[in-house]
Image (tube, rainbow, N blue to C red):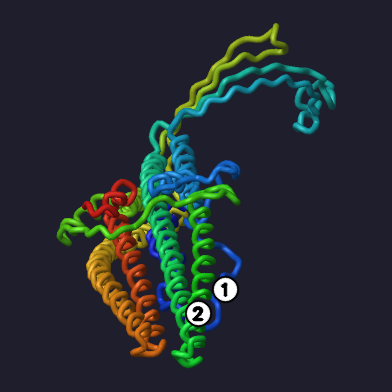
Amino acid sequence: MQCSLRSNSAVIAALVLLSIAPSTFSQSPGSSSGAPSVALPGSQNPYLGSSPEGTATSEVLQIDFKDAIDRGLRTNLGLLLAGDQTETARGERWKQLAELLPNVSIRGQEAVQTQSLTALGLKASVFHAPVPRVIGPFNYFDLRANATQSLFNYRSLEKERAATESLKAAQLNYKDAREIVVLAVGNSYLQAIAAAARVETAEAQVKSSQALYDKAADQQKAGLIPAIDALRSQVELQTRQQQLIVARNDLAKTNLSVARVIGLPPGQQFVLTEKAPYEALTPLSLDAYLQHAYAGRSDYQAAAAQVHSAELSKRAAAAGRYPSLDLDANFGDIGITPAHSNGTWQVIGGINIPVFAGNRVHGDILEADAQLRQARAQFGDLRGRIDYEVRTALLDLNAAAEQVEVARSSVDLAEQTLAQSQDRFTAGVVDSLEVVQAQEAVANAHENYIQSLYAHNVAKVELAYVIGDAERGVKEYLKGNH
């Protein structure tokens, strides 16, 4: 069970961003993606859910980035399930340890019974006297403590060691689950910030389009421009109004996703207080990040522990052929009644030598060997995947940083173009088409800037995760520190 969590944790981490990334990131404002995407009911990524904490209040919560992460680490469903996995591994370890510890029980009984002598084969010819068919009733009392102890059982010893390693792997998987929660919360929070920026940009574009329409309508009434210019500006205004409606709806849904990830009670009103300004990050060398990842990633350490556990399990399977030593003892009081009883005790030591168990040990060895090969293959794959993830995160970070710079320059150029077009339209040099086109360019430039800024911040969060430093260092990464 722990192996399953370990092997799936990195996959879940990779799917977190894909499953909640907004579809608008691949579209320019006003574009259409065809048929709407529909989320079908069924099982969801547990890291996108939570067990809500408390009940909704009338207070509007002010939630900064740290508070969101803290809430996610308390209530996120994926982390809660990982904690249960750890408790299951701890229970399995105690079950194996019980095979090595003394087992003590106390039993008291009072018996009243009759006995058939004929059923035991006793006949009168044996004793040369009449033998009753049934004797009794008679009774006896027995209060006794029994203890068993394994003196030497190499198979149980190796199984307990394997269970200890599995518990270690589960605890490391729990630490990795905390890293994934930080990744999920960070991405969701940044997505909400981007959605809020889109609303602000859409509102500004509506105001600009409204001003253009009002000016065009006045000039048409004055007979200075044809009706087509006023109609064109009206169409542009309504397009921007539609995009504002979509942006506000997306923001509301994104905030609902944030509430789900961090475990807010349904219906709770909140405001995200953090902004995401651009903070450049000076990355370290690739080798430094790789060394940090191999030393710091909990899923990598868990995979190593799982390999060791599989090795011990194989040794435990082979130990099924070894002899074992056991000790049994009892001490108690026995008699007709508690008032007419006496103490007795018994100590038995024995050796058990397996001779033939129907090839059960051979089957155990085959299964353990297959699990060991699987654990080693997964460990090797994870090491290669860590190298790939670190390299990819650095490529994404560098590309996103360059995109931010280009997008910021594009916004300035587009706004300058729009200002000049509006001046030319006011002076009657051009018609409204040039202004509308300039407004479209401004809208696209702002959208590209929002996308690139979001991608840059998410790339920093991803870099913190892939080197195993998300929970501790994600705030520093967002501030540009490494």
The image position of residue 31, as x and y in percent, is 46, 81
Above or below, 280 relative to 110 = below
Q: Residues within 10 Å of mark 2 (few under 14, many from 20)?
A: some
16 or 380: nearer the viewer:
16
Residue appearing at x 47%, y 72% in the figure: 206
Q: Is residue 109 left or right of residue 36?
A: right
Tell me the amino acid under the disc marked 2. Thr
Q: Position of residue 145 (x, y in %)?
A: 57, 20
Picture residue at 59% right of the left edge, 70% below the top: 40
Q: Is residue 265 above or below residue 392?
A: above
Where 447 falls versus 119 (above or below)? below
Q: Residue furthest front?
A: 222
Report the mark closest to the observer, 1 or 2.
2
> What is the crowding at mark 1: few (fewer than 14 residues within 10 Å), some, or many (at least 20)?
few
Q: Earlier in the sequence, mark 1 or mark 2?
A: 1
Residue 425 at x, y = what percent?
Answer: 37, 85
Whether residue 362 is visible here, answered yes or no, is no
Residue kind at label 1, given as amino acid type: Val
The residue closer to the viewer here, 397 or 468, is 397
Say which of 370 and 402 sits in front: 402
Q: Is 26 placed above or below 263 here?
A: below
Q: Is residue 467 visible?
A: yes
Residue 56 falls in which quadrant of the image? top right
User: Helix, strand or loop at disc 2?
Assistant: helix
User: Disc 1 on helix, strand or loop?
Assistant: loop
Q: Which mark is residue 187?
A: none
Residue 334 left/right relative to 354: right
Residue of label 1? 38
Q: Which residue is mark 2?
A: 239
